[in-house]
Image: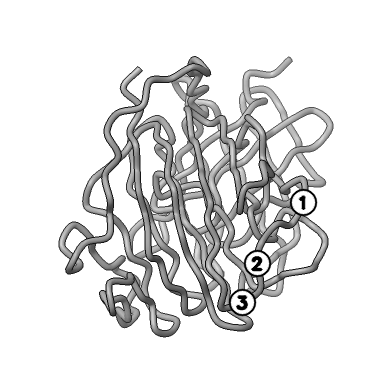
């Protein structure tokens, strides 16, 4: 079995900085998460000695050709090359994914409410987009699509209780540690799937869709221990102690072993939160 097989967290240079990505390489195929979007199959993986090449069709990338990556194993990590949407060559580095193994009987500390009288403790994500987040009538409100909002504080393992609502047709999400997206979507009455309400986007579908109609308040209780997650949506356990395989597209970075912020997606549509209560795990 090649040492190249397994899950890798990738950091890809894009000219103005870096973006996060990840891949699983197996002898029978694998999956890949790009700059944005969901996990998708990798139909072609070729390993020759300490070098690997993988190729897959585009998803949301603005390009006409397939994505192609080439890397070699160097001191236990990946050093590789690919091309940007513009066609310009670039480089990337890969670290083997952290296992993040945790005991499943944690001790929770005191709950902290993340929504206050102002946006103190929060900051907009620098994406060149306008910030439409504000405190309005005691609610944390995103009036229209714009930049994401994230906590200045970083968190490791926790239980988060979120109460939220959205208008018709909206789409948002909560990125846990800034990496794994809990999906918020106006899809009442539809079948559960990996892109639907209560999902961990692209990886874990809820057992049922228990979201309420647009305009109504939803309550999600999300427990994240390492990479194991449980989700209770409106009193229904829809994800039960399942492993999150990798980061979601548009994650803040790919250092999965580090603490990270709570990030609220603002780029897709309006949403309101009336409660974001977080209990850190003290073990």
Image location of residue 69, percent across then percent down: 62, 48
Above or below: residue 93 compared with residue 17: above
Lower sequence index among marks 1 and 3: 1
Which quadrant does the N terminus fall into? top right
Front residue of 189 and 43: 189
For disc 1, the marked residue is: 208
Tag 1 and tag 2, C-beta contact below 8 Å = no
The disc label shown at residue 214, or none: 3
Left or right: 102 with respect to 244? left
Name which residue lies at 61% across and 75% down: 62
Name which residue lies at 39% across and 84% down: 143
Above or below: residue 160 compared with residue 267: above
Question: Where on the picture, by quarter, is residue 239?
Answer: top right
Front residue of 211 and 255: 211
The disc label shown at residue 259, or none: none
Q: How far apart are marks 1 and 3 (CA)?
A: 17 Å
Q: How far apart are marks 1 and 2 (CA)?
A: 12 Å
Above or below: residue 273 compared with residue 114: below
Front residue of 1 and 99: 99
Above or below: residue 44 compared with residue 268: above
Query: How many other residues sit within 10 Å of disc 3, few (<14), some (14-19) or many (≥20)?
Result: some
Query: How many other residues sit within 10 Å of disc 1, few (<14), some (14-19) or many (≥20)?
Result: some
For disc 2, the marked residue is: 212
Question: Where on the picture, by quarter, is residue 196?
Answer: bottom right
- Secondary element at tag 3: loop
Tag 2 and tag 3, C-beta contact below 8 Å = no
Name which residue lies at 84% across and 32% down: 28
């Amino acid at each position: 079995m090649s040492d190249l097989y397994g899950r890798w967290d990738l950091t890809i240079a894009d000219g103005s900085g870096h973006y996060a990505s990840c891949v699983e390489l197996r002898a029978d195929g694998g999956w890949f998460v790009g700059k944005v979007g969901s996990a998708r199959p990798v139909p072609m993986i070729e390993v020759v000695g300490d070098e690997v090449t993988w190729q897959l069709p585009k998803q949301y990338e603005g390009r006409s050709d397939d994505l192609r990556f080439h890397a070699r194993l160097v001191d236990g990590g990946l050093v590789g090359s690919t091309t940007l949407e513009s066609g310009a060559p670039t480089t990337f580095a890969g670290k083997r994914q952290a296992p993040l193994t945790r005991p499943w009987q944690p001790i929770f500390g005191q709950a902290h409410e993340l929504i206050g009288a102002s946006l103190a403790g929060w900051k907009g994500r620098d994406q060149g987009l306008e910030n439409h987040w504000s405190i309005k009538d005691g609610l944390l409100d995103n009036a229209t699509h714009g930049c994401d909002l994230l906590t200045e504080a970083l968190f490791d393992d926790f239980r988060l209780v979120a109460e939220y609502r959205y208008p018709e047709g909206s789409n948002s999400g909560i990125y846990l540690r800034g990496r794994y997206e809990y999906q918020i979507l106006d899809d009442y009455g539809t079948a559960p799937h990996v892109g639907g309400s209560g999902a961990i986007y692209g990886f874990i579908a809820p057992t049922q869709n228990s979201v309420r109609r647009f305009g109504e308040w939803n309550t999600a209780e999300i427990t994240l221990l390492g990479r194991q997650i449980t989700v209770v949506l409106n009193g229904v356990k829809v994800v039960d102690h399942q492993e999150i395989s990798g980061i979601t597209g548009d994650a803040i970075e790919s250092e999965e072993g580090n603490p990270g912020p709570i990030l609220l997606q603002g780029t897709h549509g309006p949403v309101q939160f009336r409660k974001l209560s977080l209990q850190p795990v003290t073990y």
